[in-house]
Amino acid sequence: ARMCVVKVDGTPYLCKADEVGEICVNSGATGTAYFGLLGITKNVFEAIPVTAAGMPVSDQPFTRTGLLGFVGPDYLVFVVGKLDGLMTVSGRRHNADDVVATALAVEPMKFVYRGRIAVFSVPVLHDDRIVLVAEQRPDASEEDSFQWMSRVLQVVIDSIHQVGVYCLALVPANTLPKAPLGGIHISETKQRFLEGALHPCNVLMCPHTCVTNLPKPRQKQPDVGPASMIVGNLVAGKRIAQASGRDVSQLEDNDQARKFLYLADVLQWRAQTTPDHPLFLLLNSKGTVASTASCIQLHKRAERVAVALIEKGRLNVGDHVALVYPPGVDLIATFYGCLYAGCVPITVRPPHPQNLATTLPTVKMIVEVSKSACILTTQAIMKLLRSKEAAAAVDIKTWPTILDTDDMPKKKLANVFRPTSPDMLAYLDFSVSTTGILAGVKMSHAATSALCRSIKLQCELYPSRQIAICLDPYCGLGFALWCLCSVYSGHQSILVPPLELESNVSLWLSAVSQYKVRVTFCSYSVMEICTKGLGTQTDVLRMKGVNLSCVRTCMVVAEERPRITLTQSFSKLFKDLGLSARAVSTTFGCRVNVAICLQGTAGPDPTTVYVDMRALRHDRVRLVERGSPHSLPLMESGKILPGVKVIIAHTETKGPLGDSHLGEIWVSSPHNATGYYTVYGEEALHADHFTARLSFGDTQTMWARTGYLGFLRRTELTDASGERHDALYVVGSLDETLELRGMRYHPIDIETSVIRAHKSIAECAVFTWTNLLVVVVELEGSEQEALDLVALVTNVVLEEHYLIVGVVVIVDPGVIPINSRGEKQRMHLRDGFLADQLDPIYVAYNM
């Protein structure tokens, strides 16, 4: 037999005497082919080794052995490893068998089984990373194993091989797949690792030490001034990104707007002219009408509330009143009762009887921060506020006067209060932002009427119309639709409290079908409940006669980037029930203006664009084709409302930006809120939110800053006025963004990648903690899968976002807190993590 050693890659050149390569043999005793596998046969059994000059060594073909080695003196052949175990990391070659030998040299017998260690490499972020998997002895404690793992890391890695181990995993005894000859089946182990099916009992990841090829952190360049930006846009032929809804002054709506500046006047007028016209229908969980209110009924109930406030509550004009009611007609009647008495109402979500410890402090805080002189509520909630259980959560002795409105005397109000000017405060709108800040905004009478008028024009609301609302009525657009719009426009609102969907998932859609509603509003949480809860029941609903072909527009009320995947799966799912593919859209509002965009009934369908996620991190918008790598779909948030003007401003220089440039969305409109009543804890920061001016260009107009990043883009479509349509795309809230490696990340993008990483990940939320990225993952599956997720999460965030995950926290489903709008409360989660309250299944600190 003849043997030679050839280079591992490419053409089989002979190695020099001191080089390690693949051993090839030429002998009559070797096999000649793999049965039926022509290509691989040619490669393995018919190798022709050549000299450096390219001349064949022999006319006979050699067989590759798959062994690594070299030829020593006296015709001795030395074998140093297998070709399978060769790993190339950062351009250097390492042998799996050598790494195994080093790992075993660290007092192995106590912790792991000798022959049961697998070492292989996996590609992550353009390079191979070394993974070491060993079977742990059953009697080794977790503490011991961790010590062993960290010692292996130091020895193997730093001192002997000078290469980082990316992941070290210990699995229970006898669980690694076996090869036919009894060893470990390496490729099967690697496959399981990549699929998240290895089920380790201990994991140590070290991405910080071994991932050295991350792109350089972004260096912030000195900003171009606002004037240069305008000139640059002019030179490039780009228009300044500014857009507005229809001009309100030119739209006549039967003089009602001029005649009635105040909602209280509108209600009295309706009670006189159309007393029996029904304004509200409240449905219970069975889908039957629980209560109704016509114009005259609402007016009379409001009068009674006003009398009670003045006589029993001894309140003066301008006093603040907290309305603590479940969603229903009482809430609406007491709101108008406050206006009749000249008081300022604040709607507050009632505490949850089963969860007083977390929900009652919020109620208490809103009552205190809003300086409420009185609380109006039902008898049941009044008892709850004063109960023993409540005393454990808050100081119940400091509640202001509490009045229940369950049975009020039928007294006539001497005269309804009339505000002295439209700029007087009408109501306060309190909401807790996703970053945990409680912010109350002031709404004047003028702004309240302008808001109702704008929505009326956009949705074409008249007394003959019916709309269905499945929203919480406590803040923002949900409150306006529930309590204000019907009284202003006279249409009938079918009210569906979202809580009722817990006991009857199909309640909202059945109501829409039963009343043949053309316009309906819901929240993302409602849409999610319907998508998850009714996914398999569309046939049953069709049998029951549910038909959604009547719906012209179904709007999701949101204060975030539109969730395309959810709205699309909702549309697809209920297409079988006749829901038009064009019906679903998203609205956009925020604290400074609760309704900026709303699809309404006229105008072109919402458009979708695809932007490059990498450019977005650098605060740039780069439009790409659908399906291109790193593309992110963004859907337009409905149409800009009548009377609303929007401009995109640079976050730092406050200069105007050009079309399709990313900046902060600023808004100017008659229904902007007039200011924060108090931002609990951050008063000074927010002084300019309502009175911002551009630093260049039109420096006269007063704008309100929304705190959201987005861009305007002129489309090829024409809007109702015949002009080209300007689409507004919301990218995300500035408060939520994470600054990492000099770039701006939106949590939702990282979370979307993580959720895609494994089928058992139900939900995910990310936040930063001392410059570390923390990923919290809800595991929907057996707990033995928990540790599989650590590596998968780390891999996907590295690959798609160039970020190293610092901590992976695996928790049970339902741990990530979500507010009533269906938004993740990442700051609450962060507080819970830091206070050690999450009760996690596993926490992995990546080294």
Image (cartoon, rainbow, N blue to C red):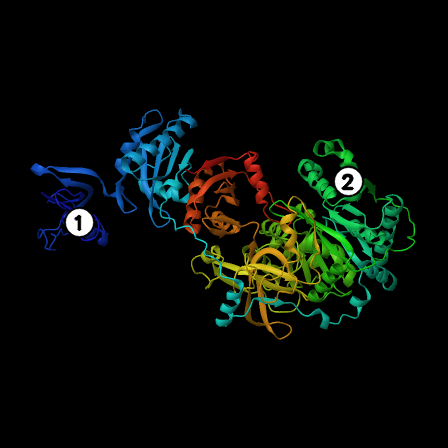
Q: Where on the picture, by quarter, is residue 837?
A: top right
Residue 636: where, in percent of width, then height? 57, 62
The residue lying toward the viewer, choosing from 394 and 86, is: 394
Total numbered labels: 2
Q: CA distance from mark 1 to mark 2?
A: 85 Å
Residue situated in front as seen by the camera: 695 or 218? 695
Q: Residue at x 20, y 41 (%)?
A: 67
Image quadrant containing the C terminus:
top left
Q: Mark 1 against mark 2, which lies toward the viewer? A: 2
- Residue lying furthest left in this view? 74
Q: Are discs 1 and 2 less than 8 Å apart at CB?
A: no
Q: Secondary structure at mark 1?
A: helix
Lower sequence index among marks 1 and 2 = 1
Q: Quadrant of residue 376?
A: top right
Q: Residue at x 77, y 55 (%)?
A: 426
> Residue 55: x and y, percent?
10, 55
Q: Does residue 208 appear to the left or right of 73 in the view shown?
A: right
What residue is shown at x 34% (from left), y 34% (from top)?
153
Label placed on residue 45: 1
Q: Quadrant of the N terminus?
A: top left
| Residue where numbered disc 2 is placed | 381
Q: Nearer the viewer, residue 731 or 467?
A: 731
Compared to 485, does 347 lie above or below?
Answer: above
Residue 167 numbered tag: none
As drawn, which residue projects farthest toward the bottom?
722
- x, y percent for residue 338: 82, 51
732 to 438, vertically: above or below? below
